[in-house]
Amino acid sequence: MTTSPASRKPSRLRTLSDEYRELAARLRQGGGAERIARMHQQGKLAPRERVERLLDRGGPWLELGLLMAYDRYDGQAPGAGVITGVGTIEGREVVGVDNDATVKAGSWWPETITKMLRAQEVAMRQHIPIVYLVDSAGVNLPYQGGVFPGQYGAARLFYYNSIMRRYLHVPQIAAVMGSCVAGGAYLPALSDVIFMVEGTSFMGLGGPNLVKGATGQTIDAETLGGARMHTEISAVAHYRVADDGACLTRIREYVARLPRVGGIQQRILPARRPARPPICTTSCRRTTGCPTTCTSCSRACWTAASSTSSSPTPRKR
């Protein structure tokens, strides 16, 4: 008695694969559609939209650490609030680090540091540029005890910044596309070049509310640490751009101008014909004397399709 394909129970590998795809699709939504819509209302692109616009269309993208912290903090930290991976810009391999502002305003969890350190290590080992798309509220204060302490705490991010800039000469490009406060402000400040989006970006150790509470002075974010202030007065940033789309275009142009050095080497080999023809899938299961079309199910027979190859070894039925 044979069992029909529809009634067969899926294998455990198939079940696990389906569960992973469902989980990955949910994690890629970040904080959800409502928060993405809120970013659009502010004139910003969503985090993954920024990654898509930054990288070559249809080019390779290897995401790193998508499952980080997915089962911690009651599911409040999908992807640990940051998107990291390796892709290409103008045909050149780069590492991307993009804060997900839909997840707790892009604040840093302990696992966020682990992901960002891993991305920096990939850039250092492969000697390829690294691009930071910064939109973060800084450290997630309830979990700050696990962010900075230790040899591989957040301070190591800035140590790697210095190593890449001073010794390894790995290009570091930072784009401040939203909030960039407290310890997170060091990350772009220690990069080689900084782009800031006018009207939506802020970079500083503390925002207007902190200034108000500490000194009683009332000041707006643009005057305190906006794009115009940092490009015209403090000279911390290099370029001021109109919006997210223009910022990503300028980054692509900048990366295209960088000198070419040895990095990740990719080589795609052409497909070869199989050494043996595939197993016959027709219902007749013949091994010799097959016609061009199967007499049982009218499908093209595998022997006819592989007539240019050597004769197949008869298979036992």
Image: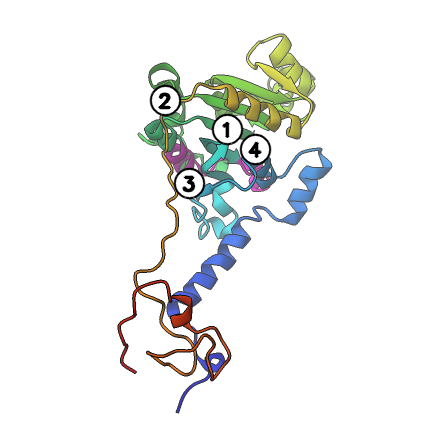
In primary-sequence order, the first of circles 1 and 2 is: 1
Instruction: Give the residue pinned by disc 3.
Output: 111
Q: Amino acid at mark 1?
A: Tyr
Viewer-nearest of labels 1 and 2?
A: 1
Instruction: Give the residue pinned by disc 1.
Output: 132
Residue at 50% x, 47% y is 78
Task: State whether residue 314 is above or below residue 13.
Answer: below
- Element assignment for label 2: helix
Instruction: Give the residue pinned by disc 4.
Output: 54
Camera sees residue 83? yes
Q: Nearer the viewer, residue 49 or 74?
A: 49
CA separation in Å, label 2 and label 4: 26 Å
In primary-sequence order, the first of circles 4 and 1 is: 4
Which class describes the residues within 10 Å of circle 3: few (<14), some (14-19), or many (20+)?
Answer: many
Q: Amino acid at mark 4?
A: Leu
Q: Quadrant of the C terminus?
A: bottom left
Say whether residue 222 is left or right of residue 68.
right
Q: Amino acid at mark 3?
A: Glu
Q: Which residues are magenta?
A: 99-119
